[in-house]
Image: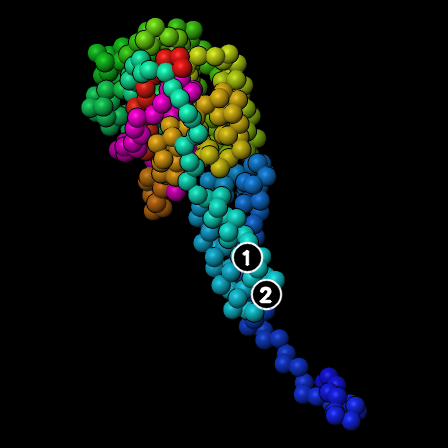
């Protein structure tokens, strides 16, 4: 009961306050639970950190987290919890804003084009997509082919079938997912590899009289509860591209990271690199997974390039037998400005 003042100023008992409906409490609780993941993951994205499990895994799902955030807003409104509804609205707006497609870099001028370079990067999933990749490469005729999860049999099949168009190669020969091979239409020099669990070979070559650094990327995935190797190997890749003093560079492969991951953006920043998909306005086209019951939901396969290149086109062809889409990028190597 609560008091009610009469005109004479005396108090008399008023009607009882309506009790909180249990249904509203349950609805508000559900809204809070739904809001937790979008709030934490979006905060980490805005703060530029990948956090710990499950944040690195959920960052790959960032655009999809607008769904639980939106549902949390509806439930909070239905429960008549204004503070919770306001919080949900802020989280939904922040998550939606963070999920917008990345815009191309702001660039004002380039030198004249010197050569058109076609790059193809593909993960063939333990070699299962080797035959399909051969057919794709013969049809598209890339100048450089970066292949992840390519074991000895896969490497032999590729170098044999593509010997006429991509006669030069360097590889990390290893079983299963640890093998990788880089094939080139031009002679390769200064071969080496970034130390990692999965093969990351690299080399230099010459295009239009200029030395171009080539590096295949395939760090470990951020496994739940064990994202340390993923972070360390992306850091090694970052240090390798940062060691390039100047000149054209191409870094391509399965990064096991999207542009929503701080560790991936660090690679871009350290090497002064750009993502070809972003420059082509296709930064949210998912490349994984393309097998199973789930639709592809994240772009973890990339072709990165230095400022010496501009992007003419980017496509994402499927490779039968693999759980990744390939990335096919047409780039123009530019002369001095």
Picture layout, residue 12 above or below residue 198: below
Residue 278 at x, y percent in the picture: 39, 32
Q: Nearer the viewer, residue 85 or 196?
A: 85
Q: Nearer the viewer, residue 60 or 132?
A: 60
- N-terminal-most mark, 1 or 2: 2
Q: Residues within 10 Å of mark 1 (few under 14, many from 20)?
A: many
Residue 277 at x, y percent in the picture: 37, 31
Q: Check if mark 1's residue and mark 2's residue have beta carbons within 8 Å.
A: no
Q: At 70% across and 88% down in the image, what residue appears?
A: 14
Q: At 67% across and 85% down in the image, what residue appears?
A: 16
Picture layout, residue 118 above or below residue 103: above
Locate the C terminus by quadrant: top left
Q: Is residue 92 left or right of residue 114?
A: right
Image mark for residue 88: 1
Residue 93 at x, y percent in the picture: 50, 51
Report the span colored magenta: 297-324
Q: Which residue is denoted by mark 2 in the rendering?
A: 82
Q: At 36% across and 13% down in the image, what residue appears?
A: 335
Q: Secondary structure at mark 1?
A: helix
Q: Is residue 309 left or right of residue 36?
A: left
């Amino acid at each position: 009961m609560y008091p009610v003042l009469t005109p004479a100023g005396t108090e008399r008992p008023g009607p009882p306050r309506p009790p909180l409906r249990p249904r509203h409490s349950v609805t508000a609780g559900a809204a809070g639970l739904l809001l937790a993941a979008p709030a934490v993951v979006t905060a980490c994205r805005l703060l530029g950190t990948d956090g710990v499990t499950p944040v690195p895994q959920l960052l790959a799902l960032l655009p999809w987290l607008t769904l639980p955030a939106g549902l949390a807003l509806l439930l909070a409104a239905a429960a008549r919890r204004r503070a919770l509804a306001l919080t949900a609205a802020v989280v939904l707006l922040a998550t939606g804003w963070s999920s917008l497609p990345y815009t191309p870099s702001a660039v004002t001028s380039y030198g004249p084009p010197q050569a058109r370079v076609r790059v193809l990067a593909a993960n063939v999933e333990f070699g299962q997509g080797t035959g399909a990749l051969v057919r794709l490469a013969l049809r598209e005729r890339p100048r450089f082919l970066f292949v992840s999860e390519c074991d000895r049999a896969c490497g032999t099949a590729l170098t044999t079938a593509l010997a006429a168009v991509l006669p030069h190669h360097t590889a990390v020969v290893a079983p299963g997912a640890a093998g990788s091979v880089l094939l080139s239409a031009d002679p390769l020099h200064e071969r080496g590899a970034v130390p990692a669990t999965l093969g990351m070979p690299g080399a230099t070559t010459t295009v239009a009289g200029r030395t171009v650094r080539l590096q295949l990327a395939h760090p470990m995935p951020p496994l739940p509860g064990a994202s340390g190797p993923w972070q360390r190997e992306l850091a090694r890749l970052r240090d390798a591209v940062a060691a390039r003093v100047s000149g054209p560079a191409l870094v391509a492969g399965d990064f096991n990271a999207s542009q929503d991951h701080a560790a991936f953006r660090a690679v871009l920043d350290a090497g002064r690199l750009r993502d070809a998909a972003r420059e082509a306005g296709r930064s949210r086209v998912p490349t994984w997974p393309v097998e199973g019951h789930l639709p592809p939901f994240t772009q973890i396969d990339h072709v990165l390039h230095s400022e010496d290149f501009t992007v003419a086109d980017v496509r994402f062809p499927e490779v039968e037998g693999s759980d990744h889409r390939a990335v096919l990028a047409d780039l123009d190597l530019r002369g001095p400005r």
